[in-house]
């Protein structure tokens, strides 16, 4: 409790409070614009906050983070155009509610679900952060390497439809991290004779290009714009109506919140799979599953609460272990590294104002986001009146500025465009981007932990099996990696054992 009170002392400073409010506002706008999302928005805004102190900049990013969670559901509910990937499941029943004339009730329910679920999971975050960090202080390079393997196993085995495509994405990300100087020997590698590659490929270049430019190219191809603007206003009556309906589905709400938090904590998963999982579970246990997809309130509340919980949960392994739980958390990890901070168990000891100020700001951002998003719906919908032809050059300019600030060379702008094409091709070919981005962020740390472990053991791989923690983590990583194979085998056995239909009589 003393740590949290200290965090509120930091977060409630006027400059930090203003940063949080501005972050929530910009995050909501970013969530509303279909071509952007929390990951893209955080990446684009990092160059803007370089001059801020680390704790103020991180509080700003937490506001962006919390605001974008709800902003994406506004367009999903009103126009059937999800502003963020995590809002896709919210459109399944949110948009049908709009067609039934219940847009205000849907928006109110979405805001309340995001606020309550986010607040509950922030409490869980507060309770588990310090014990987990203190436990991680006893770890060495072998244990951290094993944990990194768990992260890769989670994003490969659980993060995508295709095991092969997820593995290719991870391998590409790891290859990108080897460009430049070897951190152990100091020798250049994979520079291909180009001096510009000596500095390596910065994570900001990869993220801004793949998520920013790549998403813009996809959005331009799919014409993600609205031809008519729907206006809605959440009145007090709508809020009370939504609360009454949600009170009757509290079991589904709690279940979705806990599922979202658990999925978010798993490295590399995040809010998007959490929202789909919660929607499927809610439909499975509903007394009226046939109503889902026709404007059922539970079909909106379940994914929205899980998405909010998943985004909060994704920050827990980031702060305590230095492992991002989602692509957006990976961007925040990169930002901390740019400030010269190294997320992990020592961060809470060396920089408590950063960690606890960030945690406290999540409480504040949840409240500010709920207020803004309940009473400012007409303002957010008017943003969609901005022509897409105006949005594209503005966002592109921000992407190039972000790439240029990596090392202030024109070469990095070319890399931003190149990774934009990579991101676009990944989308077109249905390759997951998240594994590549997380591998880019964790790649150097993974290599260092692996090589330091081998140096400690004089080249013997037996060091990875000496401690109980390392062995447990390696077993968990193996389960994650082999899970798709096990699932495919079970489906094959189920099909073989199912009775074949009798041939039709002639």
Image (cartoon, rainbow, N blue to C red):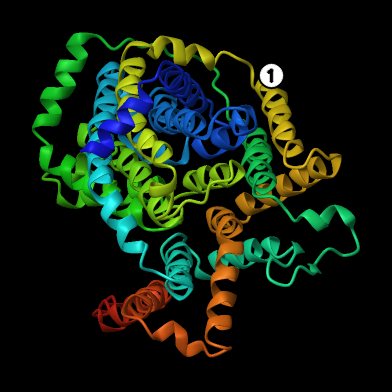
Given the current orientation, which residue lies at the most extreme right position? 193
Quick one: 30 or 387, which is closer to the camera? 30
Compare residues 416 and 368 and report the one nearer the observer.
368
Location of the C terminus (image quadrant): bottom left
Residue shown at 47%/67% (left/top)? 148
Q: Which residue is mark 1?
A: 390
Furthest-left residue in view? 248
Q: Residue at x 65, y 41 (%)?
A: 208
> On screen, 95 above or below 227?
below
The quadrant of the picture occupied by the N terminus is: top left
**Looking at the picture, how far across and down is residue 22, in whole percent?**
47, 19
Q: Is residue 152 left or right of residue 217?
A: left
**SS at mark 1?**
helix
x and y, in percent, of residue 351 in the image: 44, 43
Instruction: Answer few, some or many: residues within 10 Å of disc 1's Cα (few below 14, many 20 plus, some between 14 and 19).
Output: few
* The image quarter in which residue 298 lies: top left
Q: Is residue 232 above or below residue 7?
A: above
Choose between 66 and 464: the one closer to the eye.
464
């Amino acid at each position: 409790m003393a740590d949290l009170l200290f965090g509120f002392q930091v977060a409630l400073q006027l400059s930090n409070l203003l940063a949080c409010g501005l972050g929530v506002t910009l995050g909501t706008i970013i969530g509303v614009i279909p071509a952007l999302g929390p990951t893209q928005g955080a990446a684009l805004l990092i160059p803007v906050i370089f001059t801020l102190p680390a704790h103020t900049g991180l509080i700003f990013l937490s506001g962006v983070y919390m605001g974008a969670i709800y902003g994406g559901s506004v367009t999903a509910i009103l126009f059937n155009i999800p502003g963020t990937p995590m809002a896709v499941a919210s459109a399944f029943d949110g948009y049908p509610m709009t067609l039934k004339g219940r847009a205000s009730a849907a928006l109110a329910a979405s805001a309340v679900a995001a606020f309550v679920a986010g607040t509950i999971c922030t409490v869980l975050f507060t309770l588990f952060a310090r014990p987990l960090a203190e436990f991680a202080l006893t770890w060495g390079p072998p244990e951290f390497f094993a944990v990194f393997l768990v992260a890769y196993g989670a994003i490969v085995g659980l993060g995508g439809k295709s095991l092969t495509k997820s593995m290719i994405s991870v391998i590409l990300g790891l290859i990108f991290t080897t460009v430049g100087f070897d951190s152990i020997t100091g020798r250049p590698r994979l520079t291909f004779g180009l001096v510009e590659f000596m500095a390596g490929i910065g994570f900001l270049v990869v993220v801004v290009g793949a998520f920013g430019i790549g998403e813009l190219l996809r959005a331009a191809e799919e014409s993600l714009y609205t031809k008519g603007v729907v206006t809605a206003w959440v009145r007090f009556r709508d809020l009370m109506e939504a609360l009454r309906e949600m009170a009757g589905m509290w079991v589904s709400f709690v279940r979705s919140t806990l599922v979202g938090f658990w999925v978010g904590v798993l490295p590399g998963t995040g809010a998007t799979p959490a929202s789909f999982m919660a929607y499927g579970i809610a439909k499975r246990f509903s007394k009226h599953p046939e109503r889902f997809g026709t404007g059922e309130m539970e079909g909106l509340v379940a994914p929205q609460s899980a998405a909010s919980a998943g985004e909060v949960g994704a920050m827990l392994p980031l702060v305590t272990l230095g492992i991002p739980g989602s692509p957006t958390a990976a961007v925040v990890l990169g930002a901390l590294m740019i400030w010269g901070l190294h997320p992990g168990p020592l961060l809470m000891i060396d920089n408590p104002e950063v960690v606890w100020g960030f945690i406290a700001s999540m409480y504040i951002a949840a409240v500010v986001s709920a207020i803004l998003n309940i009473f400012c719906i007409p303002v957010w919908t008017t943003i969609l009146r901005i022509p897409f032809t105006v949005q594209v050059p503005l966002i592109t300019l921000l992407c190039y500025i972000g790439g240029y600030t990596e090392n202030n060379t024109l070469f990095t702008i070319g890399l931003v465009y190149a990774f934009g094409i990579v991101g676009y091709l990944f989308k077109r070919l249905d390759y997951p981007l998240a594994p590549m981005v997380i591998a880019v962020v964790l790649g150097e740390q993974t290599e260092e932990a692996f090589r330091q472990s081998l140096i400690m053991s004089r080249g013997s791989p037996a060091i990875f099996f000496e401690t109980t923690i390392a062995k447990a983590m390696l077993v968990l990583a193996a389960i994650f990696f082999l899970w798709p194979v096990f699932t495919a085998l079970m489906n094959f056995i189920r099909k073989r054992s199912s009775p074949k239909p009798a041939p039709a009589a002639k």
